[in-house]
Image (cartoon, grey):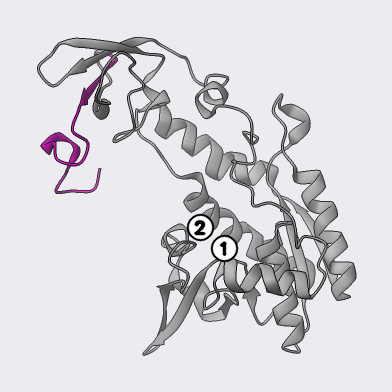
Amino acid sequence: MSGGVDSSVTAHILKQQGHQVEAIFMRNWDTLDERGSCPSTRDWHDVQAVCKQLDIKCHEINLVKEYWNSVFSHALDEYSRGRTPNPDVLCNREIKFGVLLEHVTKRLGPFQWFATGHYARTAGRGDSTVLLRGADKRKDQSYYLAAVDSKHFSRSLFPLGLLDKKRDVRKLAIAASLATADKEESMGICFVGERRRFDEFLAEYLPQHAGEILSHSGKTIGKHKGLFTKTIGQSAGISGWQDKWYIYAKDMASNRMYAVQNRYVHRHLFNARVL
């Protein structure tokens, strides 16, 4: 459980179905070491409150070291190479469905099912279990689980997979008077905080070298504060133009970015392969 409404309703549904439920809260980031705010302490308190309401046991597991080594350090390496990783994808593969499962087994003994609040579904295909998109197209989170070894899905449950966040989940939380029923959805990254700029956060860990932004014809049209501050397809943030410019390439050797206009039609913003 994360301390949000989704995992709270997941636990509620499982309890209503008659399962013997125990909650696990992962602490992945040491907030005492960072200047930004991370609501992990509040989240842990919310998990405890909901578990008390549902009369289920809850456990906290510190995975700060594992998260740093398997997720954050890898993400920094990717950013330093001018690429844009997705920490959530790595976290699900390496932490939640990786070391967390190992810790759960050691702490609680063999278990039958592992449930999360992801908006995703699974289905049997012969002798294997495949991952499917969640019914709520706006909240579908199957992408974030796509890198997880499929062997883990055979004993996984996604109770929210067939539900709609606005229509079903929030109402279930309110009806059950869960402590997180009115909790706003977190839109930030835990280790960054909700009010900090992500590029400013990365600048604390990576050298920040300013450089030029060029048009596809080679004309200088602006400046950037570091190749990791923009990703392919993102607005270049150049003022003074009627039409926006969008980043389509980065050159690590020259520390330059390249941008074009006409976001939806320019050929440089389309690719026939995965970058």
The magenta region covers 255-275
What is the CA distance from the residue labelled 2 to the residue labelled 1?
A: 5 Å
- Residue 245: x %, y % from top left: 26, 25
Q: Quadrant of the N terminus?
A: bottom right
Q: 156 or 16: which is nearer to us?
A: 16
Overall secondary structure of the magenta section: loop
Taking the spot 41% from the left edge, 14% from the top edge, the residue there is 225
Task: Please tell me whether residue 88 belongs to the stretch shown in magenta.
Answer: no
Give yes or no for residue 268 being in the magenta stretch: yes
Q: Please state if 107 lies on the left or on the right of 195 as rendered.
A: right
Residue, x 73% and y 37% (percent of image)?
Answer: 30
Above or below: residue 95 compared with residue 169: above
Q: Is residue 145 above or below residue 110?
A: above
| Residue at the extreme front | 242
Q: Disc 2 vs disc 1: Cβ atoms closer than 8 Å? A: yes
- Image quarter hosting the C terminus: top left
Task: Give the percent coordinates (x, y) of residue 27.
Answer: 73, 48
Q: SS at mark 2? A: helix
Residue placed at 18% from the left, 33% from the top?
A: 262
Badge 1: how crowded within 10 Å, few (<14), some, or many (20+)? some
The image quadrant that residue 129 belongs to is bottom left
In the picture of the structure, the residue carrying the numbered disc 2 is 93
**Mark 2 Cα shell of 10 Å, populated few (<14), some (14-19), many (≥20):** some
Tell me which amino acid carries mark 2.
Answer: Arg
Q: Is residue 269 visible in the rendered structure shown here?
A: yes
Residue type, mark 1 in image? Phe
Badge 1 is on which residue? 97
* Above or below 192: residue 171: below
